[in-house]
Image (cartoon, rainbow, N blue to C red):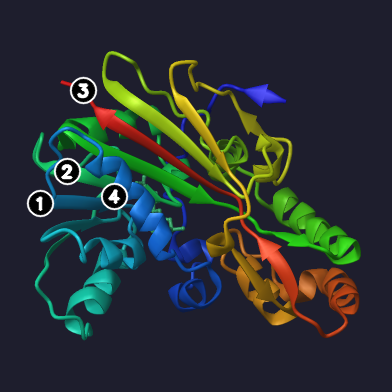
Amino acid sequence: MSKTETAPAQELGFSFKQGVNWSEYLDYRPVYPPSFFERIYTYHAAKPSSSWSVAHDIGAGCGVVSSSLSARFPNVIVSDPNDGYVSLARRLLVEQSTAPGETNFQFLQEGGEKSSVASESVDVITACECIQWMDTAVAIREMRRELKVGGTLALTHYTVPRIVGNGRAQGAWKAIWGVYSKRADGPLLDHAIPIINAALESLEFLPSQWADVKRVHINAQGSFDSYRIDERLAESRSAAWEEQVWIEGDEDWADEQGIQWLKGYLATWVPVVPESDIQGLWDELEAALGGQKVRIESPLTMVFATKKS
Ligand SMILES: C[S@@+](CC[C@H](N)C(=O)[O-])C[C@H]1O[C@@H](n2cnc3c(N)ncnc32)[C@H](O)[C@@H]1O
């Protein structure tokens, strides 16, 4: 089922109220590997004259991506609209940081759709695991305003990993996500889930405004189906002039994990499904794993675009 993207809900996505726990997030979400940033930098460096002064990490949460950006940019803007998130990012990136501290961080509590960042002032914008919470057309327009001509936009999303090599375990894991999917309803999730199910293909880039749009699909087994957690699907707005790249077998987005990690990972998604509500499914998964770790592979999409004048 394909549908036109809905307007986002009034409520902000991924808030404390919805059960977000940043400590669990840091423990159980995949760590962004160096190759993730190298893909962004390689894209940006390919421009005839790329500058490397200011990066803006939008929807930064507690600042995991901002932290890595600070290794390449002397100025990093860290923004997020939810109460308390940029204060937490400031604590982790500045106050409690043991890094040399040469980067000038700026922290802004604001959403991707309306920013106080000056026009044409940013070299690279990242928005990771968050574009689905935004009014995407409005946010992409605002990001374009902030970018310098020739600047890079990088929108990324990794999704639920699949269990490989153990069909019974993957069956139980899928059933668990089936329960999540039924709980993930209402205006906020009905806006966000179709966008991630569509692997960000619903994001539109007008050829008059953007150049060199490149959509990279990692560990997706050559199919958009790999990204779907249910049947809700935003309509694709990718265009024939854009480049589509499929990369399989990326070990940086694969791992070996056991039952505790799988439980921890589910708990990092909102709405949170309490373990006790699906005890039978967890028991089935645990039995299928037989006390062993299992291989998991995460599909990841990275969408790159360059601002035209
Ligand atoms: C899953 S976290 C991603 C954090 C970080 N970027 C990462 O990759 O780990 C999603 C973030 O999106 C933020 N968010 C929600 N609505 C947003 C909006 N309209 N504009 C920008 N960020 C938003 C949330 O506050 C949350 O910090």
Disc 1 or 2, which lies upstream in sequence?
1
> In the rendered image, which residue does mark 1 sit on?
53
Q: Is residue 126 visible?
A: no
Location of the C terminus (image quadrant):
top left
Q: For the residues marked 1 and 4, what is the alpha-carbon distance in whole angstroms?
A: 13 Å
Task: Classify 10 Å Cα crowding around label 2: few (below 14), some (14-19), many (20 and above).
Answer: many
> In the rendered image, which residue does mark 2 sit on?
123
Q: Are marks 1 and 2 in contact (CB under 8 Å)?
A: yes
Task: Classify 10 Å Cα crowding around label 1: few (below 14), some (14-19), many (20 and above).
Answer: some
Is 175 left or right of 190, judged from the image as shown? Answer: right
Residue located at (27% from left, 70% from top): 89
Q: For the residues marked 3 and 2, what is the alpha-carbon distance in whole angstroms?
A: 13 Å
Residue located at (20% from left, 81% from top): 99
> In the rendered image, which residue does mark 3 sit on?
308
Residue located at (81% from left, 69% from top): 278
Disc 4 or 3, which lies upstream in sequence?
4
| Type of the residue with mark 2 | Asp
| Type of the residue with mark 1 | Ser
Disc 2 or 4, which lies upstream in sequence?
4
> Which of the pair 64/37 is nearer the observer?
37
| Type of the residue with mark 4 | Tyr
